Image: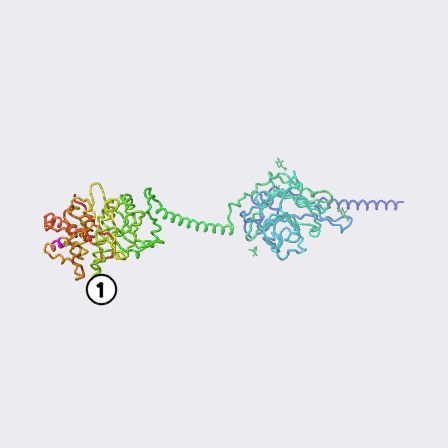
């Protein structure tokens, strides 16, 4: 009996011992290996977090995994391993992954809206750091060599922010969450959304790298092998009940070892970089059947998120290139605009017309004249003189033109002058140079005439001929004389109003291709006069040698003063001598003396030799003398002159005392010499000029 009793006691003890041990071990397994922690900010938790690479705890309590430097990694693991495998007490082959739950709030601040990446992970790792892990797409978890190696025993939930194509040619969505087993490539990838609690089928998009705090919740249920991943903007304040990812993850069992370290990894790329922060983190791993619940992280209890300076901080190279390119384009456009404005302005100067200029049909556009004369090039100049410069030009679809560029001494009289031009332009006679139009440009007045090919009478009369003999034959001279007379007659009597030429002289007579004379510059003298009129002085206009004597007394031009000038011109044509030689020679006096001594034919141009008609020559000289009568009233009209020259009327006898012997003439003559010596432009230059060389003499009363 004693032995039996002691046997029972022993068995009972052993059973109790077994039970004690089994219960003790079991309780130890279920209680001592649980891990629970909550970081509401990481201030003072340097020892609890094992950090490598760029990771650090900021003084304000934020855990920074990477800054925005390119090509960096940063890892941060809880310093103690977590027991994640559960081995059944009944069968050592029945091994499961323990349930766990973790929650964290993170912030990703991109370098700029266009420069972000690469991403970060929540990782289960056999080590509290990731040796030789690569940056960029390796996210600080793996590297090129150990990618996809089953010996890694790494599970990562990837928060990916880089869009584009991966090295393996699979597409990156750019704002997604993936589940990675021993590989940088995700098995499961989901674009980032959260489900609205009111309408669980409604997806709400948001950006991981917005710079705003984002809450992530990972819940793994061991018995069902289900992993739920929920991500949502922390500002929502509530947890969406429907997770983004809810999957059975039996593969986890192949990864997880008895003890694993839990933590974060992050990386930036060479060209893509964001700063990755964790504001708070709670974790709970369960044992047995109870479901762990990581502490809820309330945003108000966490340190303030890092300032979102993405937009203020530096630009990446693409942006700089873009800015430079845009600046260059802007610059080019500005330059173009500048030239366009200048061009418009230049055109505008021409188009900026004063009111009175607008309604004139004869106004030509400066632009056209500019083009017609090759921009008033020097090689287009065909004459210069007292009035300005003459350019030869060609307007489209027209005969050549002569453009006279006048710089009026003042613009004062231009308006009235232009009005006169308008009417002068209507003058049409075969012995007048046709005035086509005019143009005012800045301080220039441009007059457009028909181009007359043979130059001025002046040049024909005095040019030394290449071959012996006169340039102008007698017949031509006589025809020219009559032509000029005809033109003057038209001006004086045949047009609707009297036009006084005021500057009849050889250089104002142009000879056309059929040796027909054409009077030019009619009326132009008045421009000078108008421009110079000031309160008290009156200007005497004309050319020394051709000025009628009464002009120096009353300064009033008349048809008779034109007749006087014509008379001088007539004598000049016949004699081939200039009206005065700035010495004591006066053509009219000289011819008069020859007439008085009965040797009038001696006045004929010796270059003609005997090649002239004596009767016509006598007639011409006589008419010339008649026209040069001292007394204006005694001069014939142009109508009479033409009748004399045509032989329709007999020339009256010229009396010897018709005025030239009276003392006033001598007085005038001496005064005349004085004018000549003080006037350098008394005679035209040797240049073949078609321009009036006008000398202005202030009238003496
Ligand atoms: C973090 O550090 C604070 C202050 O040292 C301490 O009170 C807290 O318990 C630590 N948290 C964890 C999870 O270790
Ligand atoms: C990134 O950094 C590692 C060392 O930290 C270096 O070996 C590698 O060449 C770098 N990669 C690039 C793309 O700069
Ligand atoms: C394995 O163990 C778990 C508890 O640890 C139990 O729920 C499950 O039924 C077991 N499975 C098998 C096949 O024994
Ligand atoms: C995961 O989500 C599903 C669907 O919402 C839910 O039924 C299940 O309880 C969740 N599991 C955990 C561990 O939260
Ligand atoms: C967060 O904390 C504040 C103040 O401590 C509290 O009023 C609020 O209800 C909390 N929110 C949650 C979701 O726990």
Q: Position of residue 524 (x, y in %)?
A: 25, 48
Along the viewing direction, whichever of 222 and 511 lies nearer the viewer: 511
Camera sees residue 35: no
Query: Viewed as shown, does residue 39 lie left or right of 437?
Result: right
Indicate the secondary structure of the residue bearing disc 1. loop
Along the viewing direction, whichever of 62 and 470 lies nearer the viewer: 470
Residue 592 forms part of the magenta stretch: yes
- Report the quarter where the C terminus lies: top left
Q: Identify residue for label 1.
A: 467
Camera sees residue 235: yes
Q: Position of residue 11 (x, y in %)?
A: 84, 46
- Report the quarter where the N terminus lies: top right
- In the rendered image, the vertical position of residue 135 relative to residue 415, given as above or below: below
Along the viewing direction, whichever of 491 and 398 lies nearer the viewer: 491
Q: Position of residue 277 (x, y in %)?
A: 58, 45
The image quadrant that residue 302 belongs to is: top right
Residue 563 forms part of the magenta stretch: no
Query: How is colour applied across the structure in the image?
Result: rainbow
Ligand 4 image position (quadrant): top right
Q: Position of residue 130 (x, y in %)?
A: 62, 52
- In the rendered image, the vertical position of residue 134 relative to residue 106, given as above or below: below
The image quadrant that residue 474 belongs to is: bottom left
Q: Going by the picture, which residue comes out furthest to the front?
A: 648
Q: Main secondary structure of the magenta part?
A: helix
* Residue depicted at 18% across the width and 60% down the height: 612
The magenta-colored residue range is 589-593
Query: Viewed as shown, does residue 365 lie left or right of 494?
Result: right
């Amino acid at each position: 009996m004693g032995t039996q009793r002691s046997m029972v006691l022993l068995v009972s003890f052993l059973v109790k011992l077994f039970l004690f041990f089994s219960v003790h071990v079991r309780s130890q397994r279920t209680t001592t290996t649980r891990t629970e922690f909550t970081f509401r900010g990481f201030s003072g938790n340097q020892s609890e977090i094992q950090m490598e690479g760029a990771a650090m705890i900021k003084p304000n309590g934020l855990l920074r995994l990477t800054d925005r430097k390119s090509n960096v990694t940063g890892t941060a693991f809880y310093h103690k391993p977590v027991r994640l495998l559960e081995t059944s007490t009944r069968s050592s082959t029945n091994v499961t992954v323990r349930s766990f739950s973790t929650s964290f709030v993170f912030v990703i601040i991109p370098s700029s809206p266009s420069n972000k990446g690469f991403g970060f992970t929540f990782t289960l790792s056999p080590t509290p750091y990731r040796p030789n892990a690569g940056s960029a797409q390796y996210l600080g978890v793996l590297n090129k060599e150990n990618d996809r190696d089953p010996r890694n025993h790494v599970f990562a939930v990837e928060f990916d922010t880089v869009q584009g194509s991966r090295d393996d040619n699979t597409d990156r969505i750019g704002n997604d969450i993936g589940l990675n087993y021993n590989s940088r490539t995700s098995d499961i990838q989901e674009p980032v959304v959260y489900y609205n609690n009111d309408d669980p089928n409604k997806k709400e998009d948001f950006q991981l790298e917005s710079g705003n705090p984002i809450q992530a919740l990972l819940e793994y249920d061991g018995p069902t092998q289900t992993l739920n991943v929920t991500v949502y903007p922390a500002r929502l304040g509530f947890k969406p009940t429907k997770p983004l990812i809810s999957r059975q993850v039996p593969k986890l069992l192949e990864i997880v070892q008895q003890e694993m370290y839990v933590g974060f990894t992050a990386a930036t790329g060479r060209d893509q970089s964001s700063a990755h922060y964790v504001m708070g983190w709670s974790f709970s791993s369960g044992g047995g059947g109870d479901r762990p619940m990581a502490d809820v992280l309330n945003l108000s209890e966490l340190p303030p998120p890092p300032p979102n300076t993405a937009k203020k901080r530096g630009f990446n190279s693409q942006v700089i290139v873009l800015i430079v390119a845009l600046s260059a384009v802007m610059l080019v456009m500005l330059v173009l605009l500048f030239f366009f404005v200048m061009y418009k302005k230049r055109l505008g100067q021409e188009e900026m017309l004063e009111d009175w200029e607008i309604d004139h049909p004869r106004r030509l556009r400066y632009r056209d004249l500019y083009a017609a004369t090759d921009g008033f090039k020097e090689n287009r100049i065909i004459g210069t003189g007292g009035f300005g410069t003459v350019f030869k030009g060609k307007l489209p679809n027209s005969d050549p033109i002569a453009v006279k560029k006048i710089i009026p001494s003042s613009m004062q009289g231009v308006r009235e002058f232009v009005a006169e031009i308008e009417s002068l332009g209507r003058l049409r006679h075969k012995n007048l140079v046709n005035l086509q139009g005019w143009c005012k440009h800045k301080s220039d007045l441009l007059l457009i005439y028909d181009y007359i090919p043979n130059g001025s009478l002046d040049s024909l009369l005095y040019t030394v001929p290449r071959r012996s003999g006169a340039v102008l034959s007698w017949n031509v001279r006589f025809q020219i004389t009559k032509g000029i007379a005809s033109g003057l007659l038209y001006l004086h009597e045949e047009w609707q109003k009297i036009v006084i030429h005021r500057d009849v002289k050889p250089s104002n007579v142009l000879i056309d291709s059929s040796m027909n004379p054409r009077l030019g510059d009619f009326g132009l003298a008045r421009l000078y006069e108008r421009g110079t009129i000031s309160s008290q002085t009156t200007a005497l206009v004309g050319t020394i040698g051709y000025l009628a004597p009464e002009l120096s007394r009353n300064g009033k031009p008349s048809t008779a003063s034109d007749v006087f000038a014509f008379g001088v011109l007539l004598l000049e044509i016949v004699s081939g001598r200039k009206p005065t030689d700035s010495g004591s020679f006066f053509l009219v006096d000289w011819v008069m003396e020859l007439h008085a001594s009965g040797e009038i034919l001696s006045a004929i141009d010796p270059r003609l030799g005997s090649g002239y008609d004596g009767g016509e020559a006598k007639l011409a000289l006589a008419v010339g003398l008649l026209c040069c009568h001292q007394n204006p009233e005694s001069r014939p009209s142009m109508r009479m002159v033409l009748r004399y020259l045509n032989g329709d009327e007999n020339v009256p006898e010229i009396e010897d005392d018709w005025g030239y012997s009276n003392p006033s003439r001598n007085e005038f003559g001496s005064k005349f010499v004085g004018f000549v010596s003080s006037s350098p432009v008394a005679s035209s230059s040797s240049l073949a000029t078609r321009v009036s060389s006008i000398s202005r003499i202030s009238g003496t009363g």
